[in-house]
Image (cartoon, rainbow, N blue to C red):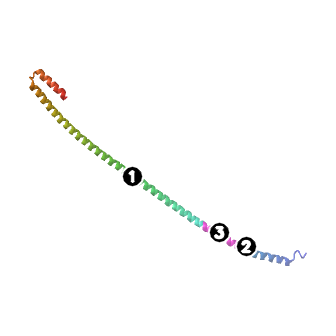
């Protein structure tokens, strides 16, 4: 029985186990721990950079919203100015049209007056000619009251 519970054999097994544990510690545990720590630091650095990038993206998004708001305001201002200018131009066009219409009416009235005057002058000339004709007919013959009335009626028919 000595072989099964041999103290020297147990001591050697314990020493072998300790040597094995020390060898595993130095060969496996330390490199694995370094690798895991390096990986954690790398992941942590990535998380920090991702957080910074997210913050930057959010800031850019806010800046973009401000730029869009300013652009909308500028577009509204431009549209309002354009509408105002269009109204002013339309008003000016209307004023010019009214002036042109007034000028055309004035010119038409002047032309009508001129035509009226010309027609009066022609009528006066025609009346004078008819009066001369009537006077010459009267002088050629003796005129009676009945003839006189008849001549006046003929004259009036020709004039009217």
Circle 1 crowding by C-alpha within 10 Å: few under 14, some 14–19, many from 20: few
Kindly report the distance in space between the C-alpha atoms of the residues bearing marks 2 and 3.
Answer: 18 Å
First in sequence, mark 2 or 3: give its number: 2
First in sequence, mark 1 or 2: give its number: 2
- Relative to 143, say whether 33 is above or below: below
Instruction: Tell me the residue at 58%/66% (across/down).
Output: 49
Quadrant where the image shows the C terminus: top left
* Left or right of 118 on screen, residue 9: right
Asked whether 133 falls inside the magenta stretch, the response is no
| The magenta segment | 26-46
Name the residue that disc number 2 marks. 28
Tell me if label 3 and label 1 are in contact, CB under 8 Å.
Answer: no
Kindly report the distance in space between the C-alpha atoms of the residues bearing marks 1 and 2.
Answer: 78 Å
Circle 2 crowding by C-alpha within 10 Å: few under 14, some 14–19, many from 20: few
Name the residue that disc number 1 marks. 82
Disc 3, SS: helix
Circle 3 crowding by C-alpha within 10 Å: few under 14, some 14–19, many from 20: few
Instruction: Tell me the residue at 53%/64% (across/down).
Output: 56
* Left or right of 87 on screen, residue 52: right
Direction right: furthest residue: 1
Residue 40 numbered tag: 3
Pair 3/1: label in front: 1
First in sequence, mark 3 or 1: give its number: 3
Residue 142 placement (x, y as % from top left) = 8, 23
């Amino acid at each position: 029985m000595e072989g099964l519970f041999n103290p020297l054999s147990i001591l050697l097994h314990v020493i072998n186990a300790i040597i094995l544990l020390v060898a595993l510690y130095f060969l496996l545990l330390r490199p694995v721990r370094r690798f895991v720590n390096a990986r954690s630091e790398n992941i942590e650095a990535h998380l920090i950079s991702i957080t910074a990038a997210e913050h930057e993206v959010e800031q850019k998004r806010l800046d973009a919203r401000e730029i869009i708001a300013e652009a909308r305001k500028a577009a509204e201002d431009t549209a309002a100015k354009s509408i105002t200018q269009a109204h002013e131009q339309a008003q000016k066009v209307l004023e010019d049209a009214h002036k042109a219409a007034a000028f055309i009416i004035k010119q038409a009235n002047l032309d009508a007056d001129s035509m009226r005057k010309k027609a009066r002058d022609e009528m006066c000339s025609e009346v004078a000619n008819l009066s001369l004709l009537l006077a010459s007919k009267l002088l050629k013959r003796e005129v009676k009251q009945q003839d006189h009335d008849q001549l006046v009626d003929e004259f009036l028919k020709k004039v009217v």
